Image: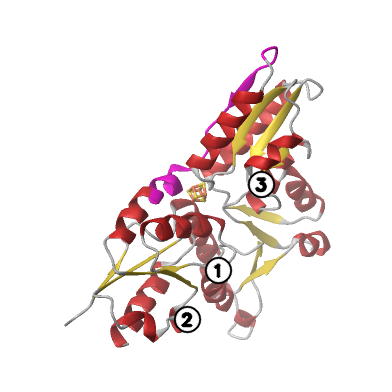
Amino acid sequence: MNKIVEIDPNSGFCFGVVNAIEKAESELNCRGVLHTPSERHTPVLYCLGDIVHNSQEVDRLKKKGLQTINHAGLQAMRGKKVLLRAHGEPPSTYEIARQNDIQIIDATCPVVLQLQKKIREKYQTTDSKRSQIVIFGKSGHAEVNGLVGQTEGKAIVIEHKADIEQLDFTKDIYLFSQTTMSVDDFEAIVAEIQSRIQPSVSFNYSDTICRKVANRMQSIQQFASKHDLVLFVAGEKSSNGKVLLSECLKANPNTHLISNASEINSEWLKSPASIGICGATSTPKWLMEAVADKCNQL
Ligand code: SF4
């Protein structure tokens, strides 16, 4: 009996990541024409942090001349071109670039830019002695660092419900969310703060979760539940990958996380009649297609 192998049509890059990769490729292609063949092996464009949390896609672009650097590398660099990825950056990064004569190619996702602006405006119009800006997100995540930077480092980051113990419930609270968090978890945090905030102060919250991700939670659950086996393709560093993987597991416990086709265990494929392949917003379509090809071969 032939097995059904289906790729989730809703999985793959979101428009923020597509936009960042298009900007990088357009820059690399135009530089490729200007460089001699030997020069093509040297980096022609730098990216601050991995352009996407997927090592196969990072390797593909590296071969075209995109080199990942970190903040120490940016600090040490002069007169180069650096791409800022979809996650966005704090104002200090733009200041370093200005001082070091670095040309920025800004691929920050418009949704993140909008959120940064909202937080910056709130910070600039509130008194930090009487109020707290709180960001529900993953501490140390690049997007969160960019958001905290809008408040000169003063925003409080909460990652789990237990972290709200850090908050002062006798001061106003303005709550925002990293774009890739779970809507259910955000609502649980809101309910907890509402139950503890003192009547004399106010609690304002903005659901700033990106619907490009949130809408996928439901659709990925439907996709996972209609297959006997689910192969979820994502890089280990993908924060949205972790959220979507847990949604798949809720709908179908026979779900395996793999980063590429070589990690498929042929034992998994023996009994299921249908195999669903899906991934994170950082998973390239070509990688899911390679996984489908391998399943068909096996
Ligand atoms: S998940 Fe949403 S906010 Fe994040 S890069 Fe993609 S489109 Fe932009």
Residue at 66 percent of width and 62 percent of height: 49
The label number, if any, that marks residue 263 in the structure image: 2
Q: Which residues are magenta?
A: 199-217
Q: Amino acid at mark 2?
A: Glu
Secondary element type, mark 2? helix
* Relative vertical location of residue 128 with respect to residue 98 in this rendering, above or below: above
Tag 1 residue = 28
Q: Looking at the image, is mark 2 or mark 3 earlier in the sequence?
A: 3
Secondary element type, mark 3? helix
Residue at 50 percent of width and 56 percent of height: 17
Tag 3 residue = 144
Does the stretch in magenta take in 208? yes
Q: Is residue 18 visible?
A: no
Secondary element type, mark 1? helix
Query: Count of labels shown?
Result: 3
Measure how far apart labels 2 and 3 are at the Cα level.
31 Å
Q: In the image, residue 235 lies at what x, y percent?
A: 54, 68
Q: In the image, residue 266 lies at what x, y percent?
A: 38, 86
